[in-house]
Each structure stands twice: as structure tokens, then as C-alpha cells.
Amino acid sequence: MFADLLRRLTAPDPETLPDPDARRALGALLVRIARSDGTYDTAEVARIDRILASRYGLTPGDAAALRQDCEALENEAPDTVRFTRAIKDSVPYEERTAVMEALWDVVLTDGQRDDEEDSLMRMVAPLLGISDPDSARARQAVEARRR
């Protein structure tokens, strides 16, 4: 399953991914951002599960199973560009701003921003076709919900 998805993600001209694969690409990107600061704690795992459940209408158990698949995929994937390209190709711009909010939600789960997380977010936004101002608005929206 992962080998086929990784093959499609690394193809020179990747096809648009079907919805289950796009879900895995987003989940793997959420896992990658959570792991970027060197810690991957239960709060981040729970946040990813809630994001996946909410975004895709999954039960908590199905969201946890999807996240576990995404963890394995993230471990095997060579780089972040593959995930962002898959998302950009299969998610309309308006929904990609929601993807940025989900990423910021994971980054801010522990209440602090680390240099590694900021660096990865600065790289991911343009790869998703999201401008810096739109990324900042996504972060501000997440911060406002946390107050």
C-alpha cells in the first residue's frame, strides 16, 4: 500500500491522487510537522486525530487508524515536497488555507513555536501555494481559537 503511494508521489509527473491517498498525504504532513521539533507527544497525536476526524468525518477509531498509517508513510517518505505537491494537486486553494490552519494547530499544540517548526512551516506554505500573509492569517485564526 505505502510502496504504491510512495511510487506515485515520487513519479516525475505524479497523477492527481485519489481521496484516500490525499488523506494520507495530509496526515503524513501533519505528522511530519509534529515531529519536526524532535518531540511527538500524546497531545500532538490527539490533535492530529481530531483534525483527521473532523476534516474527513471519521470516528475516533478510524481517525487513529488513519494517523497510524500516516506515521508509517511519513517514516518512509523521502521529503516533504511529495506530500505538499499531492495536497496542492488535489485540494482547491480555499481548502488549502484550512490545511494551513490544521498545520498551525499542530505546531501550536504544545503552546510554543520552535525554530524547526517555523522553518518547516515557511517551506510548506509556498509549496502548498499559500502566500505568507495567508499563512499568517491561518496562524492567527488558530491562536484566536485557543484564547
Image: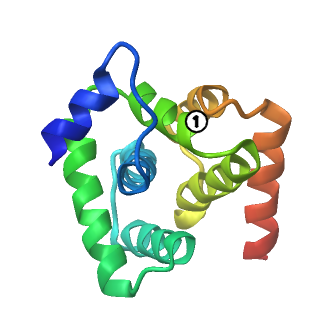
Relative vertical location of residue 15 with respect to residue 45 in this rendering, above or below: above
Relative vertical location of residue 140 with respect to residue 6 in this rendering, above or below: below
Q: How is the image coloured?
A: rainbow
On the rendered structure, is 63 left or right of 106?
left
What element does badge 1 sit on? helix
- Seen as rendered, the residue at the extreme top is 12
As shown in the figure, which amino acid type bears the numbered disc 1?
Lys
Question: Residue 115, can we see it?
Answer: no
Give coordinates of residue 67: x percent, y percent: 31, 64
Give coordinates of residue 9: x percent, y percent: 33, 30
On the rendered structure, is 81 left or right of 11?
right
Q: Looking at the image, which is closer to me, 7 or 28? A: 7
The residue positioned 73% from the left and 34% from the top of the image is 130
Question: Could you tell me how many numbered marks the image carries?
Answer: 1
The residue positioned 34% from the left and 53% from the top of the image is 39
Query: Within the image, what quadrant is residue 82 found in?
Result: top left
The residue positioned 59% from the left and 49% from the top of the image is 113
Query: Within the image, what quadrant is residue 112 found in?
Result: bottom right
Crowd tier of the residue under label 1, counting other residues whose Cα lies within 10 Å: few below 14, some 14–19, many 20 or above: some
Give coordinates of residue 71: x percent, y percent: 25, 54
Question: Residue 8, can we see it?
Answer: yes
Give coordinates of residue 87: x percent, y percent: 52, 41
Residue corresponding to mark 1: 88
